[in-house]
Structure formats: C-alpha cells, structure tokens
Image: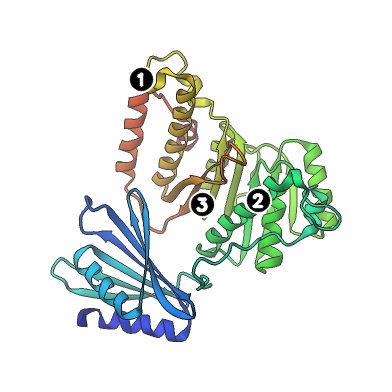
Amino acid sequence: MDIFKDFFTALDGSIERNDFVKITLSKALSKRNELTNVYIRYIVIKEEPFLSFTYRYKTNDQVKNYSFSEAKEIISDLLLNAFRFATLFSLKEDIQVFVSKKKKVTLKEQYPSFTNKPPEIHNQPKERKVTNSDFLRHLGVSDKDGNIIHKMADKYRQINKYLEIMDDLVSNTSLPKNIHIVDMGSGKGYLTFALYDFLKNQKGLDVEVTGIELRQGLVDYCNDIAKKCNFEHLNFECKTIETYTEKRIDILIALHACDTATDDAIYKGMASKAEIIVTAPCCHKQIRQQLKGTAQESPILKYGIFKERQYEMLTDTMRALLLERENYNTKIFEFVSNEHTRKNVMLVGKKSSKNNDSKRIEDKIDKLKSNFGVTEHYLEKLLKQ
C-alpha cells in the first residue's frame, strides 16, 4: 500500500545492498490476540529468494514462506489490522514504523543494531561449532587423532548446543569491542574452553574469559590446559562467587551453580549491569526447604516428585521475574534434551534498553509468593541489600 511506500523502498534497498537482517512486527492491537509477534527473514530455496514469516503465537510458532510481492501485501495487512509497530533491521540502519489508531504512518531511522547477517539457506544443516581438537584432547573429549571418545559423545553434543545458543546471543547483542566474560562455577571447564576458542579463534572477537571455581585442583588443571593451548586471555581463579569483585562483566555465565549459588551469580551479573546473563540452575533447595512442612492446597503438591518439580519451576520463574524487574528480557528453555542430561533448563536474561513495568512485575512476584506461602526468594534478598 502507498502509506508503506517508504518502508518498502527501504526494504528493497537493503535487499539490493545485500545487508538485510530481518523485520519484526510487534505491539499487537489487542492483548487478547493469540498472535504476539511476527519475525521475517530472507531465505533462498532452490536458488529462489523468499521472505520467511515466523508467526509467534502464545502456544506455538508457525512458519510460512512468501514471494516478495506476497510478503509486502501481508506486511501491509498485518500493520493495518494486527500490529502497530514494525522494525526493519539492516546492516546500514534500523527503520522503525509506527501506525497510529487513525492509520497515520510514522518512520524513524536509527543506528543499526546488527553487524552480521543471518544465513539465507532454508533448513540448513547445523554446523559443528567445535573445531579445535587440541583442548578437547586435553580435556579427554577426543583422542590424539581428534576423534570424539564414545563415552564423551553427549558432552560433545552439549558443547555444540551451548555454542549455538551463545553464538545467537552474542551476534544479536550490542557488546563492547573488548568483551569480558565471567563463568562462575566453571568446574572442569568444558564449556568455558569451548566458548573462548569459538569466540576468540573462530569469530575473531576480542574476548577475555575468566572462570571462577572453588576447587583449587580444578583451577590449576584448567590453567595448565589454557597454557598448553596458548589461550592467553583465558584464566581461572580459585574463589567463591560472593568474593569475586571485578566490577566489569559484559557476559555472566553460571551453569549448574548449585542452589543459591545461581542467585549469587545472577546478582553479580545484575550489579555489574552485564548485557547477557546465562544460567542453567540446579539443586533448587532454598524455597523447598523454606516451605517444608507447610500445607499446600493444590493436590499436585501432594506427591513428592511433583512437589520437587513445582518448586524448581517456582524458583526459576521468580528468578526470571526478578531479572525482568531489573530491566532484563528473559527466556527459559530446554538446554539439551533430557536424553542427555536432567539439568537441561536454561534461563537467559538480556539487558533491555527500555524500562520494564516494575510495578506490574512486582505484583506478579507477590502473587506467586502469596499462592505458595513463600516468605522471600534468596535473589530478592540479595537485591534488597
């Protein structure tokens, strides 16, 4: 339609320049609408270009591919009847479109959010992110010939999935030129080494990675491997999460930090205003112990195994809400399949440039606490200090 002429001219220009990243449609006209967002990317199928639409519903996603002319008609219809806001992302600029209630269209140009383009291949095979067999050999994941040891196949699969997640997060976040990453509770360092190698040696980023681990033996072991691999900007320190005092953290990682150690790590990330906080919580004890012996009305909580799962979900939901209250956008998703590990939930927070509705989020937290009889979440306590 003519009212979107400038927007589609910008779209055509980004396609011609080969720097188109994506389009997002947001701010649904009705909160009752099951369709919450639409994400549009450029793909090539059998050497033919298409725009691929991901329709994000409250309960599922649907993907449909359209020619450019079809796509423009559908975008126009969605902006007139379903959404108020659209953003065209390209490597040159971001173009924001706002449609008022009276169908007046306003365009606004901003600095580009992205520096890299996504792949254009439809259903491309997932690449293996780990290519350095040197640190894998030292860690006992591969043999001297670079072959993955059979019993370590699940660990290798986990490493690649982790790098896939981190690649997406880092590529879509505005980070400083020199990125400081802190991995709290780094353990034997499988994922710490893999992330450093991937970001530093494969993507060519200027990164400094610090692993925090309480066990001196593991710290010495990991520092020795880092030295053997010439990973000059990767080091491990023996200390607790609470005693780590470095003020600048760009990416905070805490994978399987036990019980409230996850909260200590999240708090450190928030206090440092980290752009990305990545956790895989485990050993949820604090709320479960707090509610021990407390009668619950829900029949689900009659059974021990369900009670355990319920308190895990309650703990991590409150963590997500507390992150949102501090202006982080959050996601909770499956890290790797249950087939490979039970510790498969990942909670990610990305710093938002907009202020979230803290009062509404606080009300949600209070309601959860009231429904389950929770006095205080440990992370809540830390944030009050």
> In whole angstroms, how far apart are the C-alphas of marks 1 and 2?
38 Å
**Which element is circle 2 on?**
helix
Query: Which residue is identified by label 3?
Result: 273
Residue 380: x %, y % from top left: 45, 34
Residue 217: x %, y % from top left: 81, 38
Residue at image location 43% in from the left, 27% down from the top: 376
Q: Are marks 1 and 2 in contact (CB under 8 Å)?
A: no
Q: Compared with residue 377, is residue 195 higher up or lower down, i.e. above or below?
A: below
> In whole angstroms, how far apart are the C-alphas of marks 1 and 3?
41 Å
User: 370 or 336, which is in the foreground?
Assistant: 336
Query: Of the residues tagged 1 and 3, which is closer to the observer?
Result: 1
Residue 238: x %, y % from top left: 74, 40
Task: Tell me the quarter of the picture where residue 9 sits.
Answer: bottom left
Query: Which residue is identified by label 1?
Result: 299
> In whole angstroms, how far apart are the C-alphas of marks 2 and 3?
31 Å
Label 1 is placed on what type of residue?
Pro
Label 3 is placed on what type of residue?
Lys
Label 2 is placed on what type of residue?
Arg
